[in-house]
Image (tube, helix red, strand yellow):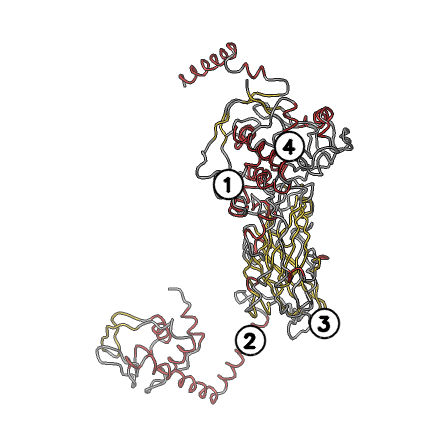
Amino acid sequence: MFTSRFIFPRFYVLLALGVVSGQILSRASAAPEGMVAIPAGVYVPLLRGAQDQPETRVDAFLLDVLPVTNREFLAFVTERPKWRRSRVSGLFADESYLENWDTDIEPGKKAPMDSPVVRVSWFAARAYARWSEKRLPTTAEWERTAAVGYTQVDGAADDVMRQELYNWLARPTPAVLPTVNSTRSNSLGVRGLHGLVWEWVDDFNTAMVTGESRADSGLDRNLFCGSGAVGATDATDYPAFVRAALRSSLTAKNTTLSLGFRCARDVE
Amino acid sequence: MKQKSRFFPTLFAALGVVLSTTSMPAAGGASGAKGPVALPQEVLDMPVEQAILTSPPLAPPPIDRDYAARVVVNLEVREEIGRLADGVEYTFWSYGGSVPGSFIRIREGDVVEFNLNNHPSSKVPHNIDLHAVTGSGGGAASTFTAPGHTSRFTFKALNPGLFVYHCATAPVPMHIANGMYGLILVEPKAGLPPVDKEYYVMQGEFYTSGRFGEEGLQTFDMGKSIDEHPSYVLFNGSVGSLVGDNAITAEVGETVRLFFGVGGPNLTSSFHVIGEIFDTVYPEAGLSLPNKNVQTTLVPSGGAVMVEFKVDVPGTFILVDHSLSRAFNKGALGMLKVSGEEDRVIYSGKEIDAVYLGSQSAQGSESAKREAALQQKIEDEIRANPAIADLRKEVLEERGKQVYMNLCFACHQLNGEGLPAVFPPLADSDYMLADRARAVRVVLKGMAGAVTVNGKKYDSIMPPQEAVLSDRQVADVLTYVFNAWGNEGEAFTTDEVKAIRHESN
């Protein structure tokens, strides 16, 4: 009792000194507008092969507070016409690319300005990130951040967050998506990771690469039927399975009505 | 890792520019399309037809061709809110817009071009594992389809049978528990025996956040699913889907065939139709070696059965999972309504309804009272007529003698004189003749310890006979020994024996 009472205040003092001396938290305060500094952490992959590490260290990085909106994406295609719906190369996007927009440069009623942009390919998301001098987060970075709860560091223990996630999974995608501002912040200050749209990650196509040989049979990806649980670190984390399944179902030019993205940036 | 993963898609993107777009997916995700199969000429020469798909409880018509065909199947996956029970909604994931999904009917030897379309509004990818398919994953890997995409693969139906199909995308229990299962029938080349009616029923469980009947839009409950504690066990995807106006029907004299499958994801069904006996059951739907005259058939999760029966009488016949809490509390109920002429010899319906008080009631029923009065009348009649009474006693003695010769004579001897110093005599026995009730008691309950008979002491054991002899037999044997060897006494009645048998000591 006594020791803990004495140690904790000292710890906080050290932290405070850290802020003052610019060692630890100054980066957070220096995070560009709309981004949050995510401290270094650990990512536990859902599926891994025999050679894979049980945990992956994730360095500190910056992440957008919110998913990219139609308004922001409109600014991008306005400046980069080759990413407009009518001009995009078929190599980089399905014919369904931005299909929910009224025209090339008018998102329209089905895509409100403040709602997350969807119907974008991985190539387009990546081009946007480069244009905005950012990059896409990796699976490890995204999952490490999404594992944080609303009120607790461990999201798995955050019943409210888990239940909201299931509720969202149980609802069909609405014809018009809500605005990004409707979402709740997790305890790191990141919003909308769950319950709004799925999000592209930079290395989405490695979702099922687990060190196993990749024969043409998809079963080797350990995702089908009962074999889906083989090699899983937590076979009860159904939402993680759903995300893994979604990522592995996609090719880089695919788009869906519930798949958007947000950007990340390295810490200087 | 970060370096590698960022490099990898870039490299692949570059390759994508150089190579054709169809080669991209090998590294870019799951589609992994190999391109159309080069079908041999004899397959290309087969007639092409579009599969007729039906929603439950209907099945497509029997196949009347006697040759193989190329059959095209188009199945759409949707994620839609629907009715689970009155006031209860659920987001079903389904094949063809129904739970169970569309019924597919093909013929052994057919070559099937299967197209799985995942609706653009879907949140998640889906696929299909058809148990009728011989090949890796039953088609699962070949049909793994992102929202708003379509996949195609081809298979040849090698084995006849009735097969389950289901989604096999992780987490599989969730996809199946949301309604992603159905049946595909591969008719044998010789076809199936003709019947009058065919219906399609499937059982599956739903794991909802709320208890059974809790109103509102329900959410899948992962914890209940892992524990295998469903809130609902249903036929055809909703409470009441086969009840009342939705019941399946037949006419008296018709033969009914049910294609019954279990989607699960977890529970095995004890399928039973109340008031019917399955004339023919094709166990596990192998469509060979049928069983006859079956009451309840076990259908595993991910399995099916085909049952046939002639309906002989009108009425409502209830389909249940005979694990009855599921029928009574979780919704696993359906109805088959049969109309037509009654046959009261096969089934009379209720003939009599009267008050029954049971034998323990103080007065007994009217009928028992009447019987007792008649019995008394007989007794009085016999007593009043010595000739009949004597005759009756002789009958009892003869019966009693048979009992004696089986059980008693070994000790008490044929002449009733017993064995000196060991077994006491019955002939002219002062001890026995002095107390009729005691005699009954000794026969029923046995006797141990010293006793003086005709002035001589005996100390031996008489075993109890109450477990061996009925009241009638005890009365008979006592009537015999009380009237044999010069003894004289009245006949014993079963009432005398009964009273002592039930006396509490």
Dot 1 amino acid type: Ala
Dot 3 amino acid type: Glu
- Provide the secondary structure element on which disc 1 rests: loop
**In this figure, which residue is indicated by the disc labeled 4?**
A123
In percent of width and height, residue B336 lies at 67, 62
Image quadrant assignment for residue B467: bottom left
Tell me the residue at 62%/67% (across/down). Answer: B189
- Provide the secondary structure element on which disc 3 rests: loop
The chain ID associated with circle 4 is A
In percent of width and height, residue A71 lies at 72, 25
Farthest bottom residue in view: B387
Alpha carbon separation for disc pair 3 and 1 = 57 Å
Residue A14 drawn above or below residue B469:
above
Tell me the residue at 37%/83% (across/down). Answer: B402
Mark 1 or 4: in front is 4
Label 3 and label 2 in one chain: yes
Left or right relative to A186: residue A87:
right
Alpha carbon separation for disc pair 3 and 2 = 40 Å
Query: Which label belongs to residue B371?
Result: 2
